[in-house]
Image (spheres, rainbow, N blue to C red):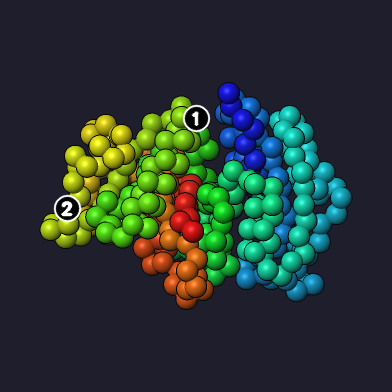
Amino acid sequence: MSTQQKLFVVVDPTAETHIALERAIIISKLHAVTPFVYVFVAVDPDAVDTRSSNDQLFRDQKWFDETIKKPLNDAGIEYLIQVSWSSEWQKSIMDSAKRIDSTVIYLPVHAKSNNRRFSFTESKWELLKGAYCPVVLIRPGAGAQRKVILAAVNFQAQRDVQRELNKKIVEQANYFAEMYGATVHVVNGYLDSMNYPDRGRLVNETGIPAERIHVRNGYTSEAVSEVAEEINADLVVMGTLGQNGMTTTRRGNTAERLIAALDTDVMVINHE
């Protein structure tokens, strides 16, 4: 029997469009049991001009009624709205998401610039590396349906924590694929031919048919983005190692490059 999911949706009141909320409403219709949506309205001080001269910082009751309540009511979704004044943007999200035992956090990210890079504030990296549940980065213009899911793994990893992370990535990809009736693919990049991933092992340990296993030579960001484009993936599931006392000093270059290289929604699984 399906249980009700709890979707934690971050809304930036200074943004013109609210893609995370829009995506959550679309995805809610695909669930057998309509999820509960927890709308968290807060301003990231690292990314937004918080001076009083910024007119977008002022929102009245009409804005809440038209922008948040109406689309949720029209979709028949049960919800709760919380407004946070905390200066600790990422910690307030993590604490609130944990408090309600959320299933997933939907976090909007800005479109990439012409040079295909985008700035990702330090607070967002802290959130990715400290979240207690998966975080889905919602892209403007990315496909809203979940028909093809791509799991990005590293089966050459030697450390137990990395192997456990591989398992989590595949489990989450399969879980959401089953929920949405989607197809799962797996991609594993490699640089050195001496570390060529064992395709048979990938099939055996992931349970994914060989024709949906993609082993590519190149940097992880290049390998994953190329396969994602080829199979028209609308969600990429990847992992990052969590807090170990170095969260603020080690952003994770591989994760950063991978997120920057993709044009689709990205689910980040944090290994605590």
In this rendering, position of residue 17 left or right of residue 270: right
Whether residue 147 is visible: no
Crowd around label 2: few <14 · some 14–19 · many ≥20 (10 Å): some
* Comparing labels 1 and 2, the label whose residue is closer to the camera: 2
The foreground one among 226 and 146 is 146
Residue that carries the numbered disc 1 in the rendered image: 180
Question: For this rendering, which residue is in front, 48 or 198?
Answer: 198
Q: Quadrant of residue 60?
A: bottom right
Name which residue type carries label 2. Tyr
Residue 140 higher or lower than 118, as above or below = above
**Residue at horizontal 57 percent and vertical 54 percent from the top:** 132
Check disc 2 and report its element: helix, strand or loop.
loop
Residue 27: x percent and y percent?
A: 58, 35
Residue furthest right in the image: 61
- Camera-nearest residue between 179 and 265: 179
Marks 1 and 2, how far apart in space?
Answer: 32 Å
